[in-house]
Amino acid sequence: MYNSSSISHFLLLALADTRQLQLLHFCLFLGISLAALLGNGLIISAVACGHHLHTPMFFFLLNLALSDLGSICTTVPKAMHNSLWGTSTISYSGCAAQLFLIIFFLGTELSLLTIMCYDRYVSICKPLHYGTLLGSRACAHMAAAAWASAFLNALLHTANTFSLPLCHGNALGQFFCEIPHILKLSCSKSHLRELGLLAVSVCFAFGCFAFIVFSYVQIFRAVLRIPSEQGRHKAFSTCLPHLAVVSLFISTAVFAYLKPPSISSPSLDLALSVLYSVVPPALNPLIYSLRNQELKAAVWTLMTGCFQGH
C-alpha cells in the first residue's frame, strides 16, 4: 500500500522500449520544440516590434504565441530528458508543477482562441463597431481575463488533485502528469470532488466551442453576402488560419478525452496526447504566417534586419 505522503516521485510512461527508439523520440521532440520556439518567438518579436501590427488581432496572436511557448516548454523538456537518459521518473513537486502549468497554458489557449473568434466576428459582422468593441482597454481586459481565469482553474485542479490520498502505486500511464492518470491512483471517494471540477471545466470548454461554432455561422453568412469575389476571398483568408488552429486544438483534445474505451490503448493514448499538447504549438505559427501577408512581411523584415545587423 502506498499513500501520498510516502510517494516522492511518479513514473511516467516511457515513449519507447529500445534505446534506438528513445533517441529517435528525443530527436523528434527536439525538432518539434525548436520549430515551436522559433515560430512563436518570431511572431512575438514581429508583433512587438512592428507598430503597424499593434491591432487587436495581432495582440491576441502574441498572447496565443506566449501560451504555446509555455505549453510546449512544460511537457517536452522532461520527456526529452527521460528519452535521452533512459529514465521515466518525475518528482512529486515536479509533477504538481507540470500539471498546474499544462492546465494553465491549455486553458489560456482555449480562452484566447475564443476571444480571437470574437475579434473575427466583430471585424466581419460589425465592422463599424470594431473600434469601440475592441479598443485597447477592452483587449487588455479580455487577455487579462483569459490568463487569470486559466490560472485560477489550474490552481483549483492542482490543489484538489494533489490533496487526494494515493494508494494504487505511482506509475502514470502518460508521458506527462495529467489529471485522469493521477485520479486512477487515488483510493479515496473524495476524487468525486475533482470529477465535479472536471465537469465544470468540460462545460466551460463546451461553452467556448458552442460560441466559436455560432460565431462562424454568423461570419460565413456575412461573408457570403459580400458582393465582390475579392472581398469574400479577403474575409475568408483572415478567418481560415484561426479556424484551422481551433479545429486542430479542439478535435485532438476532444478525441483524446472522449474516445470510447473499446479503442483505447497505451500507444493510441500517447499519440493523441502528443497531437493535442505538442503539435499545435509548433504548427500554429506556421498556419498563421502562411495565410497572413502582413505577418509574413513583418517576420521577413525582422529576419533580414537581424541578418543585416550582424
Image (cartoon, rainbow, N blue to C red):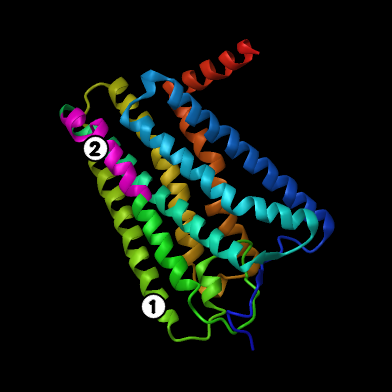
Label 1 belongs to which residue?
Answer: 193
Categorize mark 2 by other alpha carbons within 10 Å: few (<14), some (14-19), many (20+). few
Label 2 belongs to which residue?
Answer: 138
Query: Helix, strand, or loop for circle 2?
Result: helix
Say whether residue 142 is magenta. yes
Name the spot of residue 213 as percent of width and height, x first.
Answer: 30, 49
Name the spot of residue 90 as percent of width and height, x first.
Answer: 66, 64
Q: Amino acid at mark 1?
A: Arg
Q: Is residue 45 left or right of residue 26?
A: left
Answer above or below: position of 128 versus 158: above
Answer above or below: position of 261 versus 2: above
Task: Determine the residue positioned at 36% across, 64% down.
Answer: 201
Q: Earlier in the sequence, mark 1 or mark 2?
A: 2
Categorize mark 1 by other alpha carbons within 10 Å: few (<14), some (14-19), many (20+). some
Task: Determine the residue positioned at 63% across, 15% down.
Answer: 307
Query: Helix, strand, or loop for circle 1?
Result: helix
Q: Which residues, given as a range, are shown in magenta?
A: 129-147
